[in-house]
Image (cartoon, grey):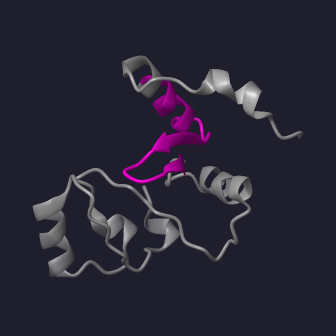
Amino acid sequence: MPTPSAASLLGLVVPPDARSLGLAARLLAQGELVAMPTETVYGLAADATQPDAVGKIFAAKGRPNDHPVIVHLLPDADLSVWAAQVPATARALAAAFWPGPLTMILPRALVSRMP
């Protein structure tokens, strides 16, 4: 499949309004990638519960399979679904600072525990 040109992708850049956020949510649910701004850079997003979708991030970026990716969670997400071990201090930090720009690095849970 040929790589799309920047000009062909320009029409896919949309303002962050309710319509475009709905489109992004539908694309993610279908296992597609979505580019989105973060506090510092633009990132590629995929539904972390869909291994094939996450694989598309690795393919699109040419990322080695042994390089981890970031998983963004809702403030009330069950951390134990995503992390093998969640210390009490991690839970306290999440309760105090999420939502917000707090990053935690925790050992990954087994895939079979993912929703």
Q: Please, is residue 76 above or below residue 69 in the view?
A: above
- Residue at (50%, 31%) from the top-left corner? 24
**Magenta residue check for 31:** yes
**Magenta residue check for 96:** no
| Residue 85 point in image, percent of width and height | 31, 81
- Viewer-proximal residue, 97 or 77? 97
Q: Please, is residue 86 above or below residue 29 in the view?
A: below
Identity of the residue furthest to the top in this view: 19
| Residue 26 point in image, percent of width and height | 51, 29
The quadrant of the image that shows the N terminus is top right
- Residue at (50%, 54%) from the top-left corner? 48
- Residue at (41%, 27%) from the top-left corner? 16
Q: Please, is residue 53 above or below residue 18 in the view?
A: below
- In the rendered image, which quarter is residue 10 located in? top right
Left or right? Give the position of 3 relative to 115.
right
Left or right? Give the position of 33 relative to 103.
right
| Residue 30 point in image, percent of width and height | 59, 35
| Residue 98 point in image, percent of width and height | 19, 57
> What is the count of numbered marks?
0
Left or right? Give the position of 44 relative to 61.
left
Which residues lie in the magenta part?
A: 22-44
The quadrant of the image that shows the C terminus is bottom left
- Viewer-proximal residue, 21 or 3? 3
- In the rendered image, which quarter is residue 72 located in? bottom left
- Residue at (15%, 79%) from the top-left corner? 88
- In the rendered image, which quarter is residue 101 located in? bottom left
